Amino acid sequence: MISLTEAIRDRGRQAGFHLVGITAAHPAPHAEKLRIWIEQGMHGTMRWMEDPDGRRADPRRWLPWARSLVVVGLGHYTGHELARAPERGAICRYACGRDYHREVRARLENLRAAVEAVAPGCRTQAFVDTSPVLEKGLGQAAGLGWPGKHTNLVRLGAGSWYFLGGLVTDLDLEHDRPARDHCGTCRRCLDVCPTRAIVAPYVLDARLCISYLTIENRGPIPRELRLAIGNRIFGCDDCQEVCPWNRFARRTDVEAFEPGAGSRNPYLLDLIGMTRGDWNRRFDSTPVHRARYEGFLRNVAVALGNWAAPEAVPALAARLDDPAALVRGHAAWALGRIGTRAATASLAARHTVESDSCVRDEIETAVAAPAPEPEPDLADRNASARAPRAAGLAQPATAERQT
């Protein structure tokens, strides 16, 4: 007869999760690192990451009855090619399918019901990354993998393309052995980061991270970081693309994570003209909705500025009349990057009626900037960042010393 712990593991696999591990409801690993990271302001405007009452640091402060945590992982790697052409927008892998919160939560509810069936009267609470938990630290404690130098959870021989979640329970279960770090001396993720956001091994400054800048950030993207964003319009996967362990990633069997037609390397000029209704219809029920309409248009404008193609001028000039100053300002920057007579004329015309000081500053800076050098190498730069997967990587055991 199998134990209760093994029965719950089996139920986790039956619920469709690819990884299932169990750990004690003790103070989470890396809680002290979280405190220091927040004190240094590296979380940017993500106030929900702050932990004044210690609930993230210790699950028992969130749920005092907690005894064990069943931590699960759901693979989302689809293997599709990411946009390399500068006129195409790159959307990070996890955001190309349906919103993962719905898929993970639905499976967790099935697991929750199964656990309560094999252990009647027990208490359970599902969690995903919107709950007050350090899910990557818990994943390591439950033996699923370790937070790599890029801070994403990496599984030995499987890679990092996983969504995490789990159940808190009052059951006393057998606990898994914590996973060991196998990054060794590798620093590919640090070296490939376009904005150098991985400021030290295992330390990510979100304020520099393209994922933060294009998703969570609600304000302007700092000018000094816009060129590095390239054609990325939602998130960035470069640090994971070059990770040697991801050569072992298996294609997901979750159909909901397959990229939808609207998210597969879309043409930038099709995006910049979208109305709010168009955008909602195209990206509703996907993670892209997290960026909000104005934020997404901001991202597309930056990508168009990095493409710097004259054919983008009419669409960008039309956005100079957008109701949102955030969109107008980034459209102005993009027009300055293109620098044609038509682009300059549209900026001058807008300057005469623009009332927002920040947008006026963007226009004045764009007009004063020298004509930009053409950047035909954007596709090459994107390709080189992702080349290790395509070219085939050395075995991590030989390419990097493992600990």
Image (spheres, rainbow, N blue to C red):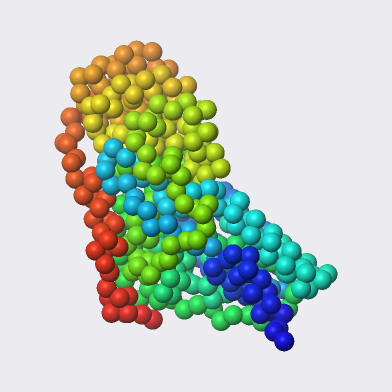
- Residue lying at the far bottom of the rendered structure: 1
Q: Position of residue 108 (x, y in %)?
A: 65, 61
Does 264 sit above or below residue 179?
Answer: above
Does 59 sit above or below residue 372?
Answer: below
The structure residue drawn at horizontal position 63% and vertical position 80%, both measured from the top left corner, is 175
Q: Position of residue 29 (x, y in %)?
A: 56, 71
In this view, the residue in front, 261 or 386, is 261
Apparent side of residue 104 relative to residue 226 in the rendered image (left or right): right
- Residue lying at the far right of the rendered structure: 121
Q: Position of residue 11 (x, y in %)?
A: 66, 71
The answer to whether any part of residue 31 appears in the image is no
The answer to whether any part of residue 367 appears in the image is yes
The structure residue drawn at horizontal position 34% and vertical position 60%, both measured from the top left corner, is 241
The structure residue drawn at horizontal position 31% and vertical position 67%, both measured from the top left corner, is 187
Q: How many marks?
A: 0
Q: Identify the image quadrant of the C terminus.
A: bottom left
Q: Identify the image quadrant of the N terminus.
A: bottom right
Q: Position of residue 291 (x, y in %)?
A: 49, 40
